[in-house]
Amino acid sequence: MYQVIIIGSGPAGMTAGVYAVRKGLSTLVLGKEVGGQMAKSGEIENYLGYGVSTGGDLAVAFHEHINKFKNLEHKHGLTVNNIAKANNGFKVSTDQGDFEAETLIITSGRNPRHLNVPGETEFMNKGVSYCDVCDGPLFKGKKVAVVGGGNSGMEAAISLAKLSPEVTIINVGKKLTGDEVLKNKISKEKNIKIIHEATTTKIIGNKFVSALEYKEANGSLKTIEVGGVFIEIGYIPSIDFDKLTKKDKFNQIVTDINCQTSIPGIFAAGDVTNIRDNQIIIAAGAGAKAALSVFYYLNRK
Amino acid sequence: MAKVIIYSTPTCGFCKAAKAYFKKYNIKYTDYDVANDTDKAQEMIDKSGQMGVPVIDIDNQLVVGFDQAKIGELLGIKS
């Protein structure tokens, strides 16, 4: 039995892992993708010490850093299915076996929200993407659509406009939401079109995406020909495996200032929680706090 | 020695993670930048039937994404 199992191997989880082993706790980090959302991020200039870096470089740097701690166990590429109270702590069930620990730190982050329209899953990686940083370059020379009129959508459109002859933003609202700076940049780009009050109804294609169908405000259906669809409509916390802790109305895990959840012995940090700001450096800080909270909790048991 | 090819793009975080993994275990590999090489991009799409990166070809067996467990298995690495 471990003293702590950390669920999630992004910046929060990896930092929590380091703090936990340095306090002498037997620690296991379980994650699906090393680096988490960080690995899918583009340019980052506000994680101090690395200059202007990319999320991918930071993810590799974090991973190499945690590898230096020989007694920090970590397993990647696995999916956590459930957590339950057990014996003197908790049982974590994964697709690669079950693990037990006295305490848990949940740092499972967020996943992109899906549109839930026909064609979306069929064409995933065949023209449908949730990450323009990851996949944008492969759409060079193709017309693309970006679904989403907030900051993520606008940022995706701006970067895709450098590669694509025409980028169409499909926005469900009456106007773009998000920062003025981005709205200004968009208005300057000649190859970005915006269609407001448009609800995506279907993604169409053969082997790969060829078009997107949407409904206008007046109810009529229109189609645009595109070789790619980037879906940027927000994120949902990754909490499917967690039926124990209290969540807020956005399904984020509710924590106090010391990362304590509603369940004694379960702590949480980073984007999966009701933290106000979703930043790598804040997630890392929260991971550290959560690990220290575990240490104090175990001392008092 | 297995023949390893990785199809990657410059900004892809998992591509970098895969290359760091190869470096750690001294695996020789050929890296094709599909953001800038349209022929190799098409080759990747034809081989894997999809556009996500990385695509890793180990002696003609494909792994889409940095699936460390599967890659380790194909290369005979225990990690």
Image (cartoon, coloured by chain):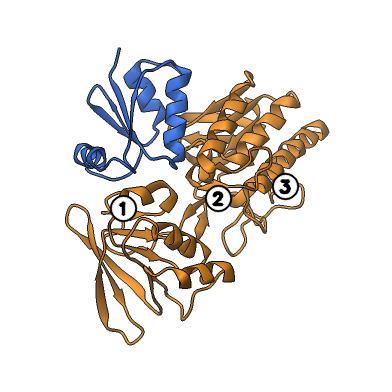
Chain colours: A orange, B blue
Asked whether residue A86 is in view, the answer is no
**Of residues B34 and B67, which is closer to you in this image?**
B34
Instruction: State if disc 1 and disc 3 touch (CB < 8 Å).
Output: no
Q: Which residue lies under the disc numbered 2?
A: A243
Q: Which residue is outermost to the right?
A: A300
Q: Which residue lies under the disc numbered 3?
A: A260
Helix, strand or loop under label 2: loop
Identify the residue at horizontal 42%, vertical 22% (top origin).
B22
Identify the residue at horizontal 56%, vertical 69% (top origin).
A178
Q: Earlier in the sequence, mark 3 or mark 1?
A: 1
Identify the residue at horizontal 49%, vertical 74% (top origin).
A176
x, y percent for residue A104: 64, 38
Q: Earlier in the sequence, mark 2 or mark 3?
A: 2
Q: Earlier in the sequence, mark 2 or mark 1?
A: 1
Q: Which residue lies under the disc numbered 1?
A: A139
Image quadrant where residue A168 sits:
bottom left
Helix, strand or loop under label 3: loop
Image quadrant where residue A113 sits:
bottom left
* Distance CA(mark 2)–CA(mark 3): 16 Å
x, y percent for residue A204: 22, 63
Residue A177 relative to residue A277: left or right: left
Q: Which residue is outermost to the top?
A: B1
Residue flagged by tag 1: what amino acid is it?
Phe
Disc 3 chain ID: A
